């Protein structure tokens, strides 16, 4: 009978990696004895061999270990300085981690199968971009379940690489389904827009920080972004400087050629920090500041940063002009964005998803123009920050508010009208709905299972 002291010595002498390599070599590579021909037991350990490649390999290793436990204890190998690596105590010491890994692999296989089945059910309904309103909820549920299930596959399992690759495809379909599903539940926005008598001129998107959204024509660009385009410029700037390791305290000389009529404080022919220029662009809606940052990043640089972040509908291609004075290199094509993408940028800022978002958030809180979103907010609602835009073609605001402890972004634009009261009434109506319904009504159970809901501004 083996003594307890011998058991402790054997446990300390056996390394899990060594015993697993030995067992794989003997069980997977050979159907004969446990020790494969050619492997030698050395005082320093066992010659390493291949890792198991499948769940079947693990099953065979486990079966051989259990078989050895049922056999009489073998005589120790007479190798000076070495213990019997495949003795009963060593086998017991390594059977439980093998059993645990098998359990994890079985879980991974079940989750892979369930996700595949959910995706198949979603695919059977059809393309999520063209589904009927009656079918889109079911499609969203299936794609959500497929993505969520794959996200729970253990990262070191045999199917982990497959799960990661498939999850990318599933997430794309989920984003499309989520967009459609959210849109079908946006009747209250359609009603609010209709009450203004200017529904076709309005664009509205409302999202919480989990990226659950409601929208009215949110994927249709307004007639012009006006100064709302300064939010994408700020997002591109902070993405650039932090990726390049540039301090926001670094200084930038303002080219006199970028002068135009301006409400901001940035003066040409002087140096300011990047942080100061960006803050002036957002809080005071500085045109000179915007034009200088466009020069700093370059047209291609601004738009590539936005593409890298996933924004394909937004385009910065024209500098800002005051009453009549055009800056140098003004650009030829009109700027472009949507309330969907502006809202998602604001969600990222208030989630602080990227370095520099806190700087933009602070600038939004210092907004000078408070005649739109800010004026529409009444206690107990808290106004958190805003960017406004106004010119002869559009009036707009993207506003962050806190309703019952939750942050929402409301972006609204009105084409070819300077009627501030319409925009304030619309924003007030959205806030009242959020307050009355404690956020968005008819939520799908389980939306909080994913750390971040997929971006729902995809068309």
Image (spheres, grey):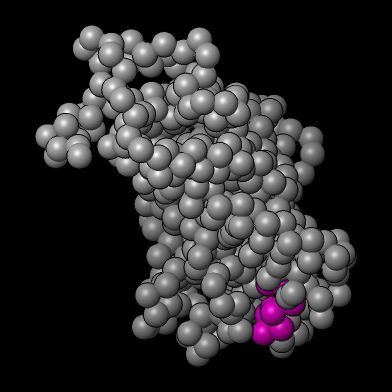
Q: Is residue 110 left or right of residue 355?
A: right
Q: Within the image, what quadrant is residue 418 found in?
A: bottom right
Asked if the magenta segment contains residue 188, the reply would be yes
- The residue at 48%/27% (across/down) is 34
Up/down of 379 relative to 128, above or below: below
Q: Could you tell me which quadrant the C terminus lies in?
A: bottom right
Q: Locate residue 291, reporting x and y percent.
A: 58, 35
Judging depth in this view, the residue of 261 and 197 nearest the camera is: 197
- Residue numbers of the magenta segment: 180-189
Give the answer, above or below, for where 36 lies relative to 236: above
Q: Which quadrant of the view contains residue 324?
A: top right
Question: Does residue 4 lie above or below 146 as drawn?
Answer: above
Q: Nearer the viewer, residue 340 or 265?
A: 340
User: Which quadrant of the structure image shows residue 368?
Assistant: bottom left
Q: What residue do we see at 51% from left, 43% from top?
A: 63
SS assignment for the magenta stretch, majority = helix
Give the percent coordinates (x, y) of residue 52. Answer: 55, 31
Instruction: Residue at 68% x, 70% y: name it.
Output: 141
Q: Measured from the top left, where is residue 313 in percent x and y?
A: 74, 48
Determine whether, in the image, residue 297 is placed left or right of residue 85. Answer: right
Whether residue 357 appears in this view of the structure is no
* Identity of the residue drawn at 47% across and 21% down: 35
Q: Quadrant of the N terminus?
A: top left
Q: Is residue 74 visible?
A: yes
Q: Is residue 261 above or below residue 302?
A: below
């Amino acid at each position: 009978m083996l003594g307890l002291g011998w058991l402790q010595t054997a446990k300390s002498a056996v390394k899990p990696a060594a015993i697993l390599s030995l067992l794989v070599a003997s069980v997977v590579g050979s159907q004969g004895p446990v020790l494969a021909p050619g492997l030698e037991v050395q005082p320093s350990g066992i010659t390493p061999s291949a890792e198991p490649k499948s769940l079947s390999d693990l099953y065979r290793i486990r079966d051989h270990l259990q078989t050895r436990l049922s056999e009489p204890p073998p005589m120790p190998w007479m190798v000076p300085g070495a213990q019997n690596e495949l003795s009963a105590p060593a086998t017991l010491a390594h059977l439980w981690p093998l059993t645990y890994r098998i359990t994890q692999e079985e879980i991974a296989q079940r989750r892979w199968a369930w996700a595949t089945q959910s995706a198949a059910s979603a695919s059977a309904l059809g393309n999520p971009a063209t589904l009927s309103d009656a079918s889109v909820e079911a499609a969203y549920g299936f794609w959500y379940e497929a993505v969520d299930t794959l996200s729970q596959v253990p990262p070191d399992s045999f199917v982990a690489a497959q799960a990661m690759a498939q999850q990318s495809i599933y997430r794309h379909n989920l984003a499309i389904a989520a967009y459609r599903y959210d849109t079908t539940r946006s009747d209250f926005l359609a009603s609010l827009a209709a009450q203004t008598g200017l529904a076709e001129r309005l664009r509205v998107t409302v999202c919480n920080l989990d990226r659950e959204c409601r929208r009215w024509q949110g994927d249709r660009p307004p007639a012009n972004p006006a100064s709302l385009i300064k939010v994408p410029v700020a997002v591109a700037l902070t993405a650039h400087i932090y990726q390049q390791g540039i301090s926001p305290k670094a200084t930038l000389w303002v080219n006199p050629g970028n002068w135009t009529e301006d409400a901001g404080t940035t003066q040409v022919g002087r140096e300011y920090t990047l942080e100061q220029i960006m803050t002036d662009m957002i809080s005071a809606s500085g045109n000179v500041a915007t034009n200088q940052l466009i020069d700093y990043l370059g047209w291609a640089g601004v738009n590539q940063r936005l593409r890298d972040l996933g924004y394909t509908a937004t385009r910065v291609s024209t500098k800002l002009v005051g009453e009549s004075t055009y800056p140098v290199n003004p650009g030829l094509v009109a700027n472009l964005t949507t309330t969907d993408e502006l809202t998602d940028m604001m969600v990222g800022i208030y989630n602080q998803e990227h370095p520099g978002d806190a700087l933009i958030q602070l600038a939004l809180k210092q907004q000078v123009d408070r005649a739109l979103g800010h004026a529409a907010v009444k206690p107990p609602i808290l106004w958190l920050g805003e960017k406004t835009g106004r010119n002869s073609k559009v009036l707009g605001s993207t506003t962050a508010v806190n309703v019952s402890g939750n942050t929402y972004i409301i972006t609204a634009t009105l084409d070819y009208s300077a009627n501030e009261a319409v925009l304030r009434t619309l924003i007030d109506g959205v806030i009242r709905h959020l307050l009355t319904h404690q956020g968005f009504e008819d939520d799908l159970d389980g939306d909080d299972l994913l750390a971040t809901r997929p971006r729902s501004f995809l068309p």
